């Protein structure tokens, strides 16, 4: 986004393209987590700590989507959302909107 803005792209176009790219990435992460569900569930259920982690994830999974906009920790949270089988439309609306808001603030700060 920074490079696009520095090279003369309008703020609106940079916002749209950065947001679309990032939303595509979180959808891919969600699908990856969804796909890994069975393998990870069996491994988590095999240990006491794993079962506890799985239960905590199911308890706070929907809330954790609100933290997915944070750099570095956000991407793993989008994989966990798929792993926990969080409702895809809820995930897409919340995580996608937060990504757009993040890029909006970045674009006005530059």
Image (tube, rainbow, N blue to C red):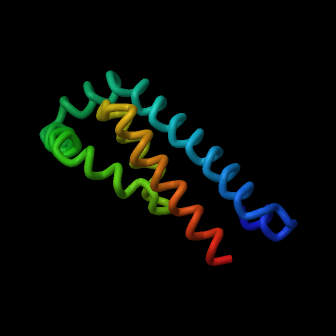
Instruction: Choose between 51 and 76: the one closer to the eye.
Output: 76
In the rendered image of this protein, does residue 28 appear above or below residue 4?
Answer: above
Query: Quarter of the image holding residue 21?
Result: top right
Residue 37 percent location from the top left of the image:
34, 26
- In the rendered view of the protein, which quadrant contains the C terminus? bottom right
Residue shown at 27% from the left, 28% from the top: 41
The residue positioned 54% from the left and 34% from the top of the image is 28
Vertical relation: 87 (above or below) 93? above
Quadrant holding the N terminus:
bottom right
Task: Identify the residue shown where x is 67% and y is 51%.
Answer: 16
Whether residue 40 sits left or right of residue 1 in the image: it is left
Question: Residue 85, how many percent across, how many down?
Answer: 31, 30
Image height of 22 relative to 67, above or below: above
Q: Residue furthest right?
A: 7
Q: Residue 106: x and y, percent? A: 60, 70
**Which quadrant would residue 45 be assigned to in this image?**
top left
Q: Is residue 59 left or right of residue 63?
A: left
Q: Position of residue 93 (x, y in %)?
A: 42, 42
State the residue in front, 2 or 109. Answer: 109
Choose between 78 and 8: the one closer to the eye. Answer: 8
Give the tally of numbered discs: 0
103 with respect to 69 (left or right): right
Task: Give the quadrant of residue 107.
Answer: bottom right
> What is the residue that sits farthest to the bottom in this orientation?
109
At 39% across and 33% down in the image, what residue appears? Answer: 89
């Amino acid at each position: 986004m920074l490079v696009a803005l520095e090279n003369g792209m309008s703020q609106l176009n940079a916002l749209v393209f950065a947001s679309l790219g990032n939303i595509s990435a979180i959808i891919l992460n969600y699908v990856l987590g969804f796909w890994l569900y069975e393998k990870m569930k069996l491994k988590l259920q095999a240990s006491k700590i794993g079962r506890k982690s799985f239960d905590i994830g199911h308890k706070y999974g929907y809330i954790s989507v609100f933290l997915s906009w944070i750099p570095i920790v956000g991407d793993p949270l989008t994989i966990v959302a798929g792993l926990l089988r969080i409702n895809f439309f809820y995930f897409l609306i919340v995580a996608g909107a937060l990504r757009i808001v993040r890029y909006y603030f970045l674009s006005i700060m530059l």
